[in-house]
Image (spheres, rainbow, N blue to C red):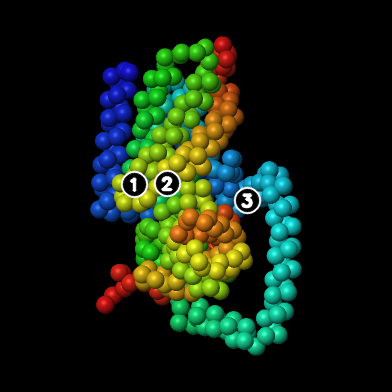
Amino acid sequence: MNYAIGVFAVLVAVISQVAIMPAFSVFGVQPNLVIVLLVAWMAARGRQEALVLIPIAGFTQGLLDSQPLGLAMLALAPLTLMTDFRELRLVDSEILPAIALTMAATVVYESTIMVTLVLTGESVTWLASVTNVLVPAAMANALLLIPVYWLIRISSLDLRQRPAFG
Amino acid sequence: MQVRTRTWFGFVVLASVLFLAASRVALLDPLENAALSVAAPIESGLRSATRPVADFINNITDINRLSNENVSLREENERLTAENALLTEAEQELRDLQGFLELRGIREGDSFVQADVFGTGPSNTLQVIAINRGSRDGIAENMLVLSPQGSVIGTISRVLADAAWVTLVTDQTSAISALIQESRAQGVVAGSADGTLDMEFVEETADVKEGDLVLTSGLGGDHPPGELIGRVIEVERAPQQLFQEVRVQPLADLTRLETVLVLSSFMPQDQATP
């Protein structure tokens, strides 16, 4: 697996996110396949590749979403800092920190969009947004991470011998 | 935290800010337009292909809700049938109905641009859809967007040459001046974070009941009057409150939109040419 496959996966995820994911709601929200893919890629393939894919995903998503180009990239940028967290290996598992990172990345992503709305003069109901959007979205993405992580992991020949939980 | 990661983070943030600045002066609109033009047919194809699968999964998970909805729809159908029979019999009520039709206009003077929905916003915070018509087709920001059946679904929030984004009425930034058709009570229909629709600022004394129709009032000149938004599904009155809490259900199913009509003949007051 190389960068080209990663970029292709990001493109598929971005297009699927705007075309398909709204039809599949979990906990009343649509999972964010792009965030999930980036975190799963980071967990299964390492920081090096993830660092390259994050801005590409942000740029591509910016081209296809309703927001100004650059906002999606800005909202995904904190993921680059989270790659260090993965390298710390605080627990003897790859998927558990990945689940935590997915939830954190989701909160940061949606919060960035909300802060932007506030900065552009729109009103945001923070409490309702947290309870109805942030928390369910974080949980939905954490659920989606598991199959995506395993898909990337079994596709990575060089990682097949490494146990995910030990 | 490693220096290299921080440097990369700084680079990504800087690039984001540069893109945002360029986007603010529409420098990159042609690039976004080209990307959307290429992606639109792919997204449309994917939406069509996965619709049956999504429906199947959602129906399984929503079986209780669908069952309850079926019961309430049957009841509503029965009530509406009885109401319709009464309307047919009563001349006065028939005149009211004709008045309503005149208020909405027979649409002879209105012009529409038909557009296909090919995408949805990736964030849960924003309730937006993408359509395959843009400024080249005469679409401008703030134009009202209707379902093919004629109820309001949202307004145009961003326009590119060949595509546009529609902010749905359920989005938390959406607010439309509205009135209850029966009692003429005024208010503002606003979206919320959880994607539901509320009519705010309805006076506590106003006669509002479940089933009442909610129309645009035209107040403020942002939208034409008399466009159907939805139906009142819940009314809550608290003794100490100045306003009632009125929950509204859009008539169109906003999760299954495939085609929409952009009302191109009405321009908001602040955009209309003098």
With B14 as the anchor, is A165 left or right in this view? right
Dot 1 alpha-carbon crowd within 10 angstroms: few under 14, some 14 to 19, many 20 or more = few
Q: Is residue A20 above or below residue A42?
A: below
Who's the residue at 42% across and 14% down the image?
A88
Is there a contact, CB below 8 Å, between mark 1 and mark 3? no
Cα–Cα span, label 2 and label 1: 10 Å
Dot 3 alpha-carbon crowd within 10 angstroms: few under 14, some 14 to 19, many 20 or more = some
Residue situated in front as seen by the camera: B232 or A114: B232
Disc 1 residue type?
Val
Who's the residue at 67% across and 85% down the image?
B90
Q: Nearer the viewer, mark 1 or mark 3?
A: 1
With B186 as the anchor, is B231 left or right in this view? right
Who's the residue at 30% across and 39% down the image?
B16
Q: Position of residue A42 (x, y in %)?
A: 46, 24
Disc 3 residue type?
Arg
Q: Position of residue A118 (x, y in %)?
A: 34, 47
Residue situated in front as seen by the camera: B183 or B241: B241
Q: Is residue B2 above or below residue A102?
A: above
Cα–Cα span, label 2 and label 3: 32 Å
| Residue B49 in sight | yes
Q: Position of residue B135 (x, y in %)?
A: 37, 65
Q: Position of residue A53 (x, y in %)?
A: 41, 31
The residue wearing badge 2 is: A125
What label does residue A118 carry, if any? 1
Q: Quadrant of the C terminus of chain B?
A: bottom left
The residue wearing badge 3 is: B51
